Amino acid sequence: MSFVDLKEALLDWPYDSDKISVRKIRGADGLIKIQQRVELGIVQMFAEGRPDGGRPFGHDTLLDHHRARLAEYEDRNGTVVGFGLSAEECRQLREEASQYYRRYVAYFVLEDYDRVIEDTQHNLNLLDFVRDHALDPEDARRLEVFRPYVVMMNARAQAHLALREGHANSALAHVNRGLITIREIYDERGEPEAYERSEEVRILRNMRAKLASDLPAQPRSNLREKLRRAIEDERFEEAARLRDEIDGMPDQD
């Protein structure tokens, strides 16, 4: 084991508390790494696979390992009933989610939106798996509190990628879908009032307002009529999107 004093590296890259400082480097092994400057040092992550470079139980991710366990269990028993994740297994999955969180935030700063989408989707899949299979519901709840944030980051990345490709309407649709999903999360929790207090909702609404200002405006009356028809036809997802769009409009048409 070699021990290296990081003093020079830290002096060459000063810590700035006002921003997230990240960069890509090529390691001595020839692989691309992501580095983040933190207050007391530098965090380094692999750009591919698990951020820590690990292959738990021979799989790309710990989530993949437990998915394989589930598939084997179902093959043996003909059902998934009885399969469960222990408290320790859930803790390890939370640690994996935390690694991916750190990396997708870094990728967002680097404007590598494809990778943000991949890493946020991994965490959404992980949240789903723990929700469906944790033996103790409290283990699922510990992760579920982060779902609105992961959805928001996924929606923002999808929207930025669409904008980069010149599809403003598509970008707006991604933001609206994110808002709809977050509304559904709070509705399912029995906390519909929390939607309006959500920081994730505020961020997505601000992004939507900026996007909408660059698109031809629809009068509020037209949107209200579309909302009325959507409710009558029981197209509730579209109605939720229209309601959010109306709420985000200026007071005047």
Image (cartoon, grey):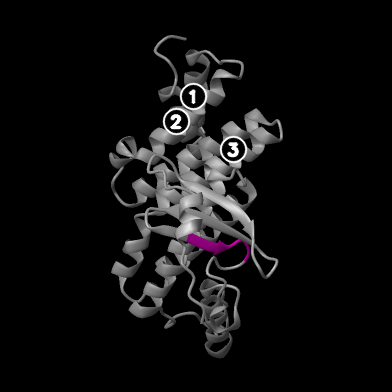
Q: Is residue 77 in view?
A: yes
Identity of the residue drawn at 52% across and 13% down:
219
Amino acid type of the residue tagged 1 in the rendering: Ala
Which percent across, then down, holds residue 92? 41, 74
Q: Please report the bounds of the magenta region as a residue range.
A: 43-48
Q: Is 128 covered by the magenta stretch?
A: no
Identity of the residue drawn at 28% across and 39% down:
193
- Under tag 1, what secondary structure? helix
Identity of the residue drawn at 40% across and 42% down:
183
Q: Contact (CB < 8 A) between labels 2 and 3?
A: no
Alpha-carbon span between mark 1 and mark 3: 13 Å
- Under tag 3, what secondary structure? helix
Residue tagged 3: 159
- Under tag 2, what secondary structure? helix
Along the line of sight, the residue nearer the viewer: 174 or 166: 166
Tag shown at residue 205 = 2
Identity of the residue drawn at 58% across and 35% down:
173
Tag shown at residue 209 = 1
Along the line of sight, the residue nearer the viewer: 40 or 97: 40
Alpha-carbon span between mark 2 and mark 3: 13 Å
